[in-house]
Image (spheres, rainbow, N blue to C red):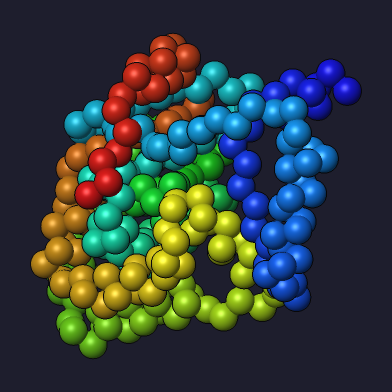
């Protein structure tokens, strides 16, 4: 009871009514919640969370983990939260994902968990490389990642128009995939409400931005994010001198990623 009273002492309430409901019923339900649940609450404004902008170049964090395997995560962050930047990173992840797995997992056999993935959080575009290895050191994994990036730059630069369009369509098809359940639609609406996108068309705007990405823009993003690691966070385990606490304190003092 004490917890519930403390929890509801100050609130920033948002309600979504979605499905087989009338407008009048939704309004009535909101009034009931206000009267029964929020009657004694102080209505306040809670600022939306934002992702911190990484410093220029690369930041390395070492975790003290009691496990024999080496963990390696490379998070490469975009410059802003605009649709254009998000589109470039989504498309880049689509193109890089399979070759990254094939090179580090199949060819080099560096680990049994290997993947490249879009790492977008709160509209902040990013790309993630993840490896878990029973034998390779963090340095060996990072060297392999750098060698892959340097070799793959030519593949990106050599994409023809037809191949690029196929990759774009693959991303767009997944992005605009039809919702299969009512809960899927509600979740999408919640995300739009959370980002104050009252037009509810973020997917369509992102899809249009993906269509407009040029090969030159893709090559430049690849170079800045993956080759040069313009803003990157490398998190590893299996080493001495863990510095996670001090690094986190320093990163939390950084400004948020700009909107565009």
Instruction: Answer left or right for 238 relative to 67.
Output: left
Residue 205, compared with residue 30, is above or below; it is below
- Name the residue: 39% across, 51% down: 123
Q: Position of residue 171 (x, y in %)?
A: 40, 74
Which residue, as the protein is rendered here, is positioned at the far left?
216
Q: Nearer the viewer, residue 223 or 153?
A: 223
Which residue, as the protein is rendered here, is positioned at the far bottom?
162
- Name the residue: 36% across, 48% down: 124
Q: Nearer the viewer, residue 119 or 100?
A: 119
Residue 230, compared with residue 162, is above or below; it is above
- Name the residue: 63% across, 22% down: 66
Q: Quadrant of residue 182?
A: bottom right
Instruction: Answer left or right for 221 relative to 10.
Output: left
Q: Position of residue 97 (x, y in %)?
A: 40, 63
- Name the residue: 73% across, 43% down: 34
Count of numbered tags = 0
Q: Quadrant of residue 84?
A: bottom left
Q: Position of residue 219 (x, y in %)?
A: 16, 62
Work out whether residue 257 can be spotted: yes
Instruction: Answer left or right for 59 relative to 249.
Output: left
Work out whether residue 98 can be spotted: no
Q: Nearer the viewer, residue 26 or 187?
A: 26
Residue 2, compared with residue 157, is above or below; it is above
Q: Nearer the viewer, residue 252 or 132?
A: 252
Which residue, as the protein is rendered here, is positioned at the far right?
1
Q: Position of residue 169 (x, y in %)?
A: 36, 82
Classify the position of the N terminus by image quarter.
top right
């Amino acid at each position: 009871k004490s917890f519930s009273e403390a929890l509801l002492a100050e609130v920033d309430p948002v309600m979504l009514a979605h499905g087989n409901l009338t407008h009048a019923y939704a309004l009535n339900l909101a009034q009931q919640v206000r009267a029964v649940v929020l009657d004694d609450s102080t209505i306040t404004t809670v600022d939306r969370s934002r992702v911190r902008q990484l410093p220029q170049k690369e930041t390395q964090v070492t975790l003290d983990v009691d496990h024999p395997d080496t963990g390696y995560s490379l998070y490469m962050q975009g410059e802003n939260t605009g649709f254009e930047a998000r589109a470039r990173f989504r498309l880049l992840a689509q193109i890089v994902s399979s070759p990254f797995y094939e090179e580090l997992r199949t060819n080099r056999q560096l680990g049994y968990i290997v993947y490249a993935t879009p790492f977008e959080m709160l509209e902040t575009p990013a790309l993630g490389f993840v490896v878990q290895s029973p034998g390779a050191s963090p340095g060996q994994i990072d060297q392999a990642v750098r060698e892959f990036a340097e070799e793959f730059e030519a593949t990106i630069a050599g994409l023809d128009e037809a191949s690029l369009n196929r990759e774009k369509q693959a991303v767009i098809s997944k992005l605009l995939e039809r919702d299969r359940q009512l809960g899927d639609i509600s979740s999408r609406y919640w995300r739009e409400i959370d980002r104050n996108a009252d037009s509810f068309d973020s997917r369509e705007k992102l899809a249009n931005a993906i269509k407009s990405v040029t090969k030159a823009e893709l090559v430049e993003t690849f170079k800045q994010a993956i080759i040069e690691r313009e803003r990157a966070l490398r998190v590893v385990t299996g080493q001495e001198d863990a510095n996670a606490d001090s690094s986190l304190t320093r990163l939390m003092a950084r400004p948020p990623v700009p909107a565009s």
